[in-house]
Amino acid sequence: MLTLPRLLRIIFVALRFGLDDLVLSSINHPLARRLLHVLRLGRKPRGPRGQRLRQALESLGPIFVKFGQVLSTRRDLIPADIADELSLLQDRVPPFPSAQAAALVETALGKPPRELFAQFETDPIASASIAQVHFAVMHDGREVAVKVLRPGMLDVIEKDLALLRVAARLVERLGGPDGRRLKPREVVAEFDKYLHDELDLVREASNCSQLRRNFGPESGREGMLIVPEVIWELTTTTVFTMQRMYGIPVSRIDRLREAGVDIPALARSGVEIFFTQVFTDGFFHADMHPGNIYVSDSPSTLGRYIALDFGIVGSLSEFDKNYLAQNFLAFFHRDYRRVAQLHIESGWVPRDTREEELEGAVRAVCEPYFDRPLAEISLGQVLLRLFQTSRRFNVEIQPQLVLLQKTLLNVEGMGRQLDPELDLWKTAKPHLESWMKRRMGLHGLRESLAKESAKWSQLLPAVPRLLHDHLARPDLSAEMLQETRRLRLAREQGNRLLAALTAVLAAALAVALWALDKH
């Protein structure tokens, strides 16, 4: 899988941009340091280290550009100056020939584009490292966008991933404590999954379909976000056909004003959409940079956001949502002890962590923000600083939360570009409090019981038999341990009412079994 010419090319580019200086600063192995000193030939690196790394990745091609983009989201692992520079990487590459695109469509869908569509534009409207997009018109008059996967991508990706795995092992082995802290093999594995997910356009189409349903008529949120319809009969793993969208890029504020869009309302709407995705659906568009977000200029939908490119989405469990909501609200109320408790209860901090020590570290992160107006506070930066501080306490930050933090920074940046006076707290806080009330109150209890009712309806008829079986097994420790675990999980997820009911049921079960055992 490894190719010598490609490896030599990577070494040459690394030396050209002075990346050996980055390696030397972290390698502790004496022989490796001497070898790199020889290769440097007395040269001194020019320019900031982040800039040199970005330029090197751009020189190595689209797969390394994508790796840099993924790495830029791991601000919990890499220095801020490098992350900032890597976030500037642009995923733009020349398009592949139109004839080749037509051949790929025919291979995937069984017919040439001229038969599948009434019109198929040969020149692509957009071209990136993984795919390019052509506009087309179907025979029934519907206008669509056809995304075509680049040919031979799997082979290219596998070869470059093999090289990245080798590099990760070297960094981990020779980089000492810092090299191990960066978790290079885990980062490459995360990138591997990210790339292979992007290679399956059916997966992206499914993400698009789910997001459209979440904001469709049945959701009660129709009109908040416009998502294109998937044309499933013209979609495969290598071709994704969707409804064509018309609008203005969200970054073109001058054009938005000319179209009559209410800019401050648009900024608030973006924040509301994001928090709705996170705390109501637990499913969010995780690539919300300006290139993927448009605004409708049609009179009937003027000012509504349009989402595009669904290759990267994030999913959050109920536990994740509870953790985030309580962290944000505790921060708002300056309850740093609660923030520390949440970190410990989540299991991401060792159980022997001193609560008051973690509280002091969190206070040092958060307190400076309260010297600023609330409108200037960045939720994404707060979450990032919490992640970075937690590193001292061996916190294992979950990938889905890192993805959310990166998306939150995108949303904040986009919102404040539209309206510098946007108050993120004022916009977000009602969503957080409303979600917490629904989860902690009677409404949350009803929802939980409704979800569990189907299981209980199947379990209750079997209770007499289960009780009889327990007579032959007087040792109740395993059953009680299981109930205790369920109680702990309910408590950690914040639903105290449900936890209390679970405790009562567990106690009743224990008493019943004890009584039956006596007879």
Image (tube, rainbow, N blue to C red):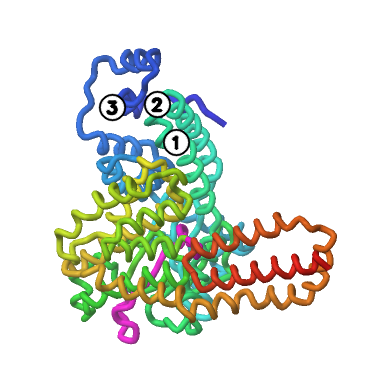
Mark 3 crowdedness (10 Å alpha carbons): few <14, some 14-19, many ≥20: many
Q: Quadrant of the C terminus?
A: bottom right
Query: Which residue is drawn at the image coordinates 75% and 65% (left, top)?
Result: 514
Q: Position of residue 317 (x, y in %)?
A: 50, 62
Question: Is tag 3's residue or tag 2's residue first in the polypeptide sequence?
Answer: 3
Residue 135, by quadrant, is: bottom left
- For label 1, the SS is helix
Q: Nearer the viewer, mark 1 or mark 3?
A: 1
Q: Amino acid at mark 3?
A: Gly
Mark 2, residue position: 175
Give the answer, above or below, for where 47 lies relative to 394.
above
Mark 3, residue position: 18
Mark 2 crowdedness (10 Å alpha carbons): few <14, some 14-19, many ≥20: many
Question: CB atoms at circles 1 and 3 under 8 Å apart?
Answer: no
Q: Position of residue 310 (x, y in %)?
A: 45, 62
In the displayed structure, does residue 239 sit left or right of residue 465? Answer: left
* Cα gap from disc 3 to disc 2, whole angstroms: 17 Å
Q: Which region is colored magenta?
A: 295-319
Mark 1, residue position: 184
Query: Which residue is drawn at the image coordinates 49% and 77% (left, top)?
Result: 444
* Cα gap from disc 2 to disc 1, whole angstroms: 10 Å
Query: Which residue is drawn at the image coordinates 30% and 57% (left, top)?
Result: 336
Q: Nearer the viewer, mark 3 or mark 2?
A: 2
